[in-house]
Amino acid sequence: MKNKYLSTFKSINLDSDIIHKETFEDLAFFYRDTSLKEELILKYKSGLIINELGFCDMSYKTGGLTGNLRFLIASNNGKDLSLIDPELSKFGFILLQSDSFFKILDVYRLEDKTQIVLLNISESFIDYFRNSNSVDEENIISWARKDFNEKISSPIVEALVSEYWKERTEKPVGMYPFSMDPSGKINFI
């Protein structure tokens, strides 16, 4: 699925072209709501790279927030689990593989709710994204804020408040006992 929200990016460098294609082509947006203490939300900072060691459950279904925090995840690597189990379609269940990396693009607050925008990146592109701030990243942020403003007061999706789904999505993305490795990459282990 082509994403109409991203601009065309022309690069003078073949490596940048490859990085762009593998990161932004066929990009889609997914949602993961939870409730977190403020002290944990404050650990997320725009520009940081985080690593989710476990699988990352998310949904293509969206509505009002089911907690005080929404992760909006931009990825072209999600796997639709309803293709394996049709019962999971009620959740819009999309799965990212374990050991996924993300650049935190934005931490946006509106009233008592927060949205954290994550761009799913390849581990081999970490250095590039640590030092980049592309037009495409800015376009994602702009679209995500508009989407959040519209969805914040929308009705919730009932399946996404079920105990099953809440248990799967209650943990924050990439947050384990907090540490930082010597390279400066945030590493939640």
Image: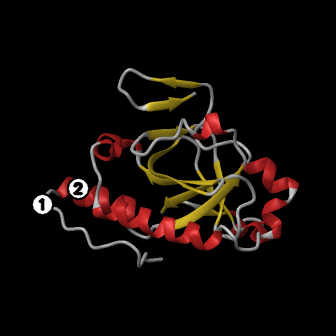
Q: Residue at x 43, y 77 (%)?
A: 2
The reply, left or right, for residue 108 in relation to residue 159 is left
Quadrant containing the C terminus is: top right
- Looking at the image, which is closer to me, 150 or 139? 150
Q: Which amino acid is tagged 2?
A: Ser
- Drawn side of residue 68 relative to residue 10, left or right: right
Above or below, 15 relative to 175: below
Residue 22's tag is none
> In the depicted view, which residue is nearer to us: 20 or 106?
106
Q: Where residue 85 appears, x then y in whole percent?
A: 77, 66
Element marked by disc 2? helix
Q: Residue 12: which disc?
A: 1
Q: Which residue is farthest left? A: 12
Q: Are marks 1 and 2 in contact (CB under 8 Å)?
A: yes
Single out the residue that lies furthest toward the top.
182
Name which residue lies at 69% across and 38% down: 37
Q: Position of residue 64 (x, y in %)?
A: 71, 68
Label 1: few (<14), some or many (≥20) within 10 Å?
Answer: few
Q: Which numbered dot is residue 16?
A: 2
